[in-house]
Amino acid sequence: MDISVIIPVYNVGKFIDCALLSMFSQTKTENVEYIVVNDCSTDDSRLKIEKLVVQYAHLNIKLINNEKNLGVAAVRQIGLMNSTGDYITHFDSDDWVEPDMLEDMYNEIKRSGADIVVCDYYVNYEKKELYIKQPANSNSLDCVKMLLKGELHGSLCNKLVSRKLYEEHQLNFLDGVNYMEDFTVCIKLFYYANCVAYLPKAFLHYVQFNTSSYTKLFSVEKALNVEESIHHILSFLDENQLGLLCKNEIISYKLNMKKELVINTRGALQRKYSLFYPEANNLIFTNSVLPLHYKCALWFISYKMRFIGNMIFNIVNFLKNVRN
């Protein structure tokens, strides 16, 4: 089997037809297996998937229905355990892809002999579409640094990865950590990769208007997931003596994660997270990834002026909703 496509599904009935049709209609379907893991959806996702499985009976589609909701980290792990392909990619079931994605990425990874191939991607809002170019770099350490700085997308969905990286280094998804669950694995994959290839073409359409997807929901649990993910990544970097080599990038990562925590919390939780990583505060306005409004809001919140920071967030979110 050439490629395994792991597809987590949870309550995406509005999007699942478009998503799966785009993946099942690829120019390369020979020696491709699709592992669809339905995480106990309560809408009509399962019914729609089953209809498509019948419609595309000529394809190698494995449908796994969880008996109870386990969360996206466990779902990705189930998909990984049931995969047999030489190369693995992930596909979120509220996104969609261009028809030549698998063929072009497979050809590139075979041509280059790389362990990972990365491609550009689109971000799709309701009213507009953005092309996001990824940095080109074949060095694994440089890629780890770019992931930490937020310059390289931390998702697995715009990447095709050699199976041997997962197997040789026993890489698994953290059970129960359902936010940034792929980023923690991504860091390790790039660290262990001998060579990384870049394909300057976008295939993935990353949908940003599904308010019910795993990554869009906010809860206290999500904040705890972020904390656990941060701790796990920092521990991994420390265990592999990357603390000094990636010193500045780690501070940038802490700053980006602090932003995630304070923008998505209020009250006592926000006060707690505003005190995280004080060593990163001096880099707020020199950060190359954060937009200016995030920098200003984060600065006010970090220096105990949360009302002003939250007001900036609220204004920006209102304007985004109007434009997008």
Image (tube, grey):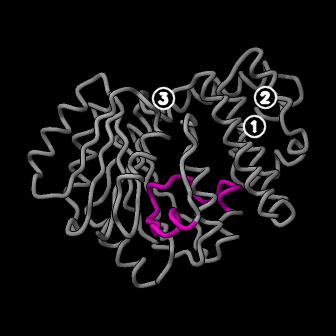
- Tag 2 near tag 1, CB within 8 Å: yes
In this picture, residue 187 sits left or right of residue 82: right
Question: Residue at coordinates 31% horizontally, 70% vertically from top-left?
Answer: 2
Q: Residues within 10 Å of mark 2 (few under 14, many from 20)?
A: many
Mark 1 or mark 3, which is nearer the start of the sequence?
A: 1
Q: Nearer the viewer, residue 74 or 189?
A: 74
- Under circle 2, the secondary element is helix
Question: Residue at coordinates 70% horizontally, 27% vertically from top-left?
Answer: 312
**Residue bearing the label numbered 2:** 273
Q: Which residues are magenta?
A: 146-168
Mark 1 or mark 2, which is nearer the start of the sequence?
A: 1
Q: What is the three-letter code of the residue carrying label 1?
A: Lys
Residue 253 lies, in percent from the top left, at 74, 49
Q: Residues within 10 Å of mark 1 (few under 14, many from 20)?
A: many
- Under circle 3, the secondary element is helix
Question: Residue at coordinates 82% horizontally, 47% vertically from top-left?
Answer: 285
**Residue bearing the label numbered 3:** 322
Q: Residues within 10 Å of mark 3 (few under 14, many from 20)?
A: few
Q: What is the three-letter code of the residue carrying label 3?
A: Val
Q: CA distance from mark 3 to mark 2?
A: 29 Å
**Residue bearing the label numbered 1:** 258
Q: CA distance from mark 2 to mark 1?
A: 7 Å
Residue 255 lies, in percent from the top left, at 77, 44
Q: What is the three-letter code of the residue carrying label 2?
A: Tyr
